[in-house]
Amino acid sequence: MKTITQISMQTHSDKHCNIYLDGAYYCSLRLETVVENRLKVGQEISTEKLDEIQISSLYTHALDKAMGLLSKSSKTEKQVRDYLQKKGFTLSLCDKVIEKLKEYRFVNDELYAENYVECYKSKKGKYLIERELKLKGCGEEVIKKALENVEEDTDSAYEIAVKFLKGKEKDKKTLSSVYRKLLSKGYGYDTCNEVLDRLKDEE
């Protein structure tokens, strides 16, 4: 059991309260929910019970928040969960919302990864795309499947190099900068070397 040590109104909302258990922030609840369940400072309560209270009262609200986020652009499961947790929803409620979103395919990491690769494969190298998808929460198998048929676009890497070189001398120092630029864009060593060879041949 835990003890409710503080119930405070949120600074940006007069309809929501922050609930603290044993001195640490635990979750956010609507003021009407706090009143209806007669929650008060000093009261002993289990985290399971508090999760149950939040889920029953805030599920629709949390789902609406998630749908609002997804209406702007597609997101991974991790991105939606992180967003909801920042809004004060418990992990249990986040899981329940994610489960519903996945059921209706509003959240689908495989489809997200495929679309992301399709959008950026001509602008970034495979290694950078892989790193970015990992940061967005896609699993290794999901990323591997999305990238398995993607060939590194040397022409795109070349275009990036040409744009970078515009107005500059093609000296050794500048070409080294081009090489680092392409690496930062996620292109492999073979592609970087091929582009540099192409640039040198043009001289």
Image (spheres, rainbow, N blue to C red):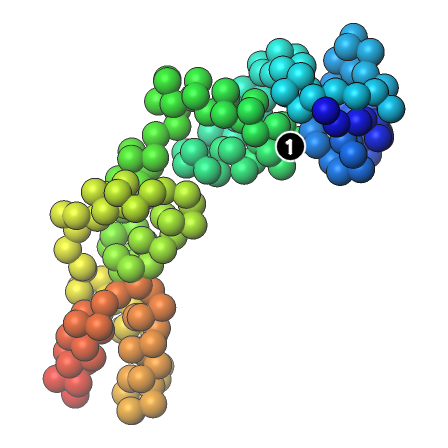
Q: Quadrant of residue 57?
A: top right
Residue 55's place in the image compared with 5, above or below, is above
Q: Is residue 49 left or right of residue 124?
A: right
Query: 1 and 41: which one is in front?
Result: 1
| Residue 53: image location, x then y, percent | 67, 14
Q: Residue at x 17, y 85 (%)?
A: 200
Residue type at numbered disc 1? Lys
Can you say which quadrant of the picture contains the C terminus?
bottom left
Residue 22 visible = yes
* Residue 139 percent location from the top left of the image: 33, 43
Kindly indicate the quadrant of the structure image that contains residue 19: top right
Residue positioned 84% across, 30% down in the render? 6
Residue 54 is at least partly visible in this image: no
Q: How many marks?
A: 1
Q: Helix, strand or loop at disc 1?
A: loop
* Residue that mark 1 sits on: 87
Image coordinates of residue 165 in percent, x first then y, are 32, 78
Q: Is residue 103 left or right of residue 114?
A: right
Callout 1 crowding tier (Cα within 10 Å): few <14, some 14–19, many ≥20: few
Between 103 and 50, the one nearer to me in the picture: 50
